[in-house]
Image: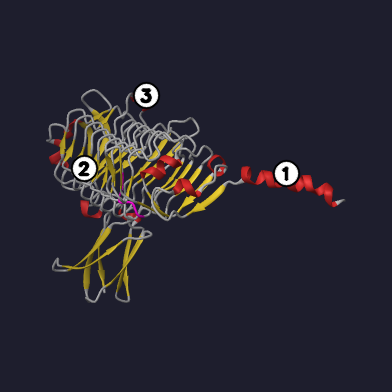
Amino acid sequence: MKIRSLLPVAFAMLCMTPAMAQSKKVTPASAGTLATLLTDDEKTSVTELVVSGPVNKTDFIFINTLTALETLDIKDAKVAEETLEGITHPADVLPKEALYKNETIKKLVLPASITSVAENAVDYTSAADIDFSPCVNLKTIQREAFQSNNFLEAINLSGLKSLESIGVSAFNTCSQKAGVTEVTIDLSGCSALKEIEESAFANNKASALMINLSGCASLTTIGDQAFLNGKETSVDLTGCSALETIGKRVFSISTRSLAKITDVKLPASLKTITTEAFRNQAKIANVSILAVTPPTLGATAFYPTDDAYDAILTVPAGSKNAYETNDEWKKFKTIVEAESSSVNEFEAAETSIYAANGIIFVKNGVEGSVVNVYNVSGTLVATGTVAGGEAAIQISTKGICIVQTVYKTSKVSL
């Protein structure tokens, strides 16, 4: 083949290069300069953008103009403060409306440095995959931050040990596209989480939903309608060892024909279950509660039948009379006592506790939960935290110790 016959091919390949550019990694020298780091061709062709270094609200405005962008990785970006049009967007906060109504991004990796996600930051987008795993410093998710992300396939906040609050409607009305069928809301190990606010995860449209709250040991309040109209089949709150209040219509469903919950497990700390908390959940068959003293139960909190509850209510040993004489709890037709005391918990068999060579081992514990070790006099002598389902605690004390986990309390000999 003659050299001159190759020239048109080479020229064509050169011309194609800008159009084929799909991935771009950039490190801005200063916030607000991201737009200068992409060519005009890249602004319409880049599908994956990895950003390290300083960014601000101006940079997110630019990102929203990238018409082909599908993956945005800002794990190593650091948000700088900026004031635009009289509004100050603070440092280390994913800005208000940062990716509002972005219809191209499918995968988003959030910055490791952020302490908060501002209101409406990532709502009404087409994101199916939002990666929170780098966000070890994240403390607050503000109102409507991720609302109406219809393609969202999972809400995985597991292991975010700094997270303290999830705001009003933060994830309201997500996952409603037909292709999104099974969704997990995973808050396991969020050991600092104190409050899930009103409608935070309401109206998730997936046909099957799983909620994991294990290890949320600081959670005291689940706000009104927080999980309204979800399609979960069970509710297990026993890992929420500080939970005091379940708000109005938290686990309610709009109509009894959509009901799916069959089992409910409630913690020992619970003080109030508000009116209509489980309204229309007509398929509930078993309710287990660890509270020795009956919590205040709002009228129609459980409402599978008219003025009488068909589910079997299991209460701690010695507490049956207290529940049978309570004006609301006595509406359950069948009340039985657990075979063991509340100290052993309903899920105790899943947790293994033993000692060897001066170390106390916990297996199959609740992720992020605290393990307390006491001597026989009741004095706290050591603590540990469950990580990867396990804990190993070095003990200098000899003799009998009492080990307390979320689900189990056992004596061990050292």
Q: Which residue is mark 3?
A: 257
Q: Which residue is mark 2?
A: 221
Name the amino acid, label 2.
Thr
At a point 50% along the width and 39% down the height, the residue shown is: 66
Name the amino acid, label 1.
Ala
Between residues 106 and 368, which one lies in front from this camera angle? Answer: 106
Point out the frontmost of discs 2 and 3: 2
Q: Which mark is residue 12?
A: 1
Magenta residues?
113-117
Is residue 285 something that shows in the picture? yes
Point out the frontmost of discs 3 and 1: 1
What is the distance, in whole Å, between disc 2 and disc 3 at their CAs? 28 Å
Decide: few, some or many residues near mark 2? Use Cα within 10 Å; few <14, some 14-19, many ≥20. many
Name the amino acid, label 3.
Ser
Which residue in the rendered view is the most extreme toward the right? Answer: 1
Which quadrant of the figure has residue 307?
top left
Q: Earlier in the sequence, mark 1 or mark 2?
A: 1
At a point 49% along the width and 37% down the height, the residue shown is: 104
The colour scheme of the drawn protein is secondary structure
Side (left or right) of 384 relative to 378: right
Decide: few, some or many residues near mark 3? Use Cα within 10 Å; few <14, some 14-19, many ≥20. few
Decide: few, some or many residues near mark 1? Use Cα within 10 Å; few <14, some 14-19, many ≥20. few
Is most of the magenta stretch helix, strand or loop?
A: loop
Whole-percent x, y for residue 131 in the image: 42, 48
What is the distance, in whole Å, between disc 3 and disc 1 at their CAs? 61 Å
